[in-house]
Amino acid sequence: MKKDLTLLVLAAGMGSRFGGLKQIEPVGPNGEFIIDYSIKDAILVGFNKVVFVIKEENYEIFKSTIGKHIEDKIKVEYVFQDNKNVPEGINIPKNRVKPLGTAHALYSAKDVIKENFAVINADDFYGREGLKEAANYLLTCASDEYAIIGYKVGNTLSENGSVKRGVVFESNGYLDKLVESEVYLKDDKIMARPLDKEESFEINFDTLVSMNLFCLTPRIFPYLEKSIKDFFLNNDLATTEWLAPNVVFESAKEMNKKVKVIKTNSKHYGITYKEDLDSLKRGIQKEIEVGTYKKDLWG
């Protein structure tokens, strides 16, 4: 019997640096969106459901664009990341527009995911190998085991400015810590500036980073429900973000488990900046030329 696998797509971010709703910016030769390629890859490697976490006000535009492309190819569900979706006693300021973080996005999907699942961002191109590694892991992992897919940082950089990456520190194939950092080039060196204001450090092309491609099981949801109130009651409700890397690491630790690190050679493309569109389109064109994708992706 085939095992169900879900792809959870985080798509509630506003794309402030890009300057718009970048998830529905055409990038393929026939108007395909960046997420089309991830969904195509996901179907080919064994995923049979996709759940989009979006803002409620974007539902109609998502359904009429992305949904129109894929709803006859794979089961699709939508959940809304709403700042009011928090336990009683937590009062998020009304003037806060920015979503509450990637862990809160996971929390928003707790009622619709009952099977093992992978997490990706809607505005990142992950490559088929990365998603295949995720599917292979999720088909065999125990219910209390998680993993992240680690990308070589040199395969994830932007030509147009710094990018945020979680620098992976591992031992024996398991995660020791993620250092969320601003990664940038300086004098032909790759530097990582930790977001907690610690001193910058040099990394090399093959240093692994997290692109938020997590491999999780439904065991994460009870942890989220248990920890959400404590987190938001002890942080600044106007600005703080509840982050998925932290809850994945903490949930595994609570189960006396470690998070497995799975390496991929996949090339990552993102559209952090408008200027990234050109390099993304060139990358997709190369994939078409070598036969990874058809020119008309869904044709």
Image (cartoon, rainbow, N blue to C red):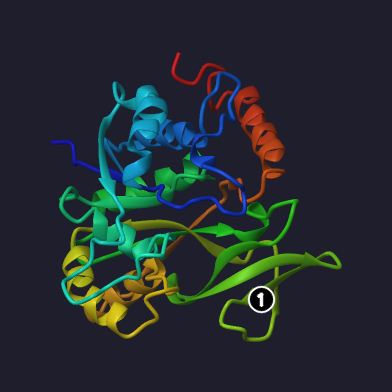
172, above or below 213, in the image: below
Point out the image quarter for the N terminus: top left
Question: Which quarter of the figure has residue 146?
Answer: bottom left
Front-most of residues 163 and 128? 163
Residue at x 27%, y 41% (from the top left corner): 78
The percent position of residue 203, horizontal first and vertical second, equals 69, 72
Q: How many marks?
A: 1
Residue 89 position, x and y percent, is 18, 77
Q: Which residue is mark 1?
A: 193
Q: Amino acid at mark 1?
A: Arg
Residue at 23 percent of width and 58 percent of height: 217
Q: Tell me the quarter of the image containing the C terminus.
A: top left
Task: Report the side of 17 relative to 229 (left or right).
Answer: right
Q: Does residue 255 lie above or below 65 as drawn?
A: below
Q: Residue at x 69, y 62 (%)?
A: 162
Q: Residue furthest top?
A: 299
